[in-house]
Image (tube, grey):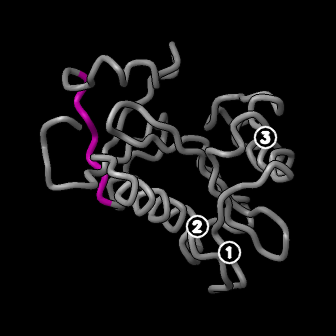
């Protein structure tokens, strides 16, 4: 799959690209099973439509098979609502979306890519993320957590600089 800034065909005919307004409904439908399983936070379709500009999507033949939202938190880019359609899992699409988000973050000068996860921390670690100990979570990052979800925060450094993440 190619980076969001370079649309084109890649393996399995997949394309990674920025989401468009007309993708909001498919993002909602793609996210629904993960919300039902408690893996994603429920976001009303209207909220997804309002934030569609924050999303990267993986599409194949006009059908969305994966998505990831990205938003800013200080000097970090945060990935959220990462999900891949069940029949497309295990093909590296999630990894590709994370790579596109990391590349975008580097290009835009962010110091790190953050991910909050209730599950799948080991998966993020295979991509080079490190779990941030609770005592090291910065004040601005606390807004990323939803009460009662028992989530963990993972960070992928995008620059060699350690201060000011």
> Residue 109 bears which disc, if any?
none
Quadrant where the C terminus sits is: top left
In percent of the image, x 59 and y 74: which residue is there?
Answer: 91
Mark with earlier residue (1, 3)? 1
Q: Position of residue 147 (x, y in %)?
A: 51, 13
Q: Position of residue 73 (x, y in %)?
A: 41, 31
Separation of residues labelled 2 and 1 (CA atoms): 8 Å
Q: Residue furthest top?
A: 147
Q: Nearer the viewer, mark 2 or mark 1?
A: 2
Instruction: Look at the image and say whether residue 130 sits in the magenta stretch.
Output: yes
Q: Is residue 124 above or below residue 146?
A: below
Residue closest to the eye, 125 or 14: 14
User: In the rendered image, which residue does mark 1 sit on?
Assistant: 15
User: In the rendered image, which residue does mark 3 sit on?
Assistant: 32
User: In the rendered image, which residue does mark 2 sit on?
Assistant: 4
Mark with earlier residue (2, 1)? 2
Separation of residues labelled 2 and 3 (CA atoms): 24 Å
Disc 2 crowd rating (10 Å Cα; few below 14, some 14-19, many 20+) is: many
- Magenta stretch, residue numbers: 128-134
């Amino acid at each position: 799959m190619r980076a969001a800034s370079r649309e084109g065909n890649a393996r399995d005919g997949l394309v990674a690209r920025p989401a468009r307004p007309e993708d909001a409904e498919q993002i909602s439908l793609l996210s629904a099973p993960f919300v039902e399983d408690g893996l994603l936070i429920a976001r009303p379709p209207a909220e997804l439509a309002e934030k569609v500009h924050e999303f990267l999507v993986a599409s194949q033949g006009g059908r969305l098979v994966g998505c990831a939202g990205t938003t800013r938190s200080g000097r970090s880019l945060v990935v959220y609502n990462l999900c891949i359609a069940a029949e497309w899992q295990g093909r590296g699409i999630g990894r590709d979306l994370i790579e596109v988000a990391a590349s975008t973050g580097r290009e835009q000068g962010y110091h790190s890519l953050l991910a909050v996860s209730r599950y799948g921390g080991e998966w993020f670690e295979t991509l080079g993320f490190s779990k941030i100990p609770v005592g090291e979570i910065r004040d601005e990052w606390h807004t990323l957590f939803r009460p009662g979800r028992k989530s963990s925060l993972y960070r992928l450094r995008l620059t060699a600089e350690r201060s000011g993440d």
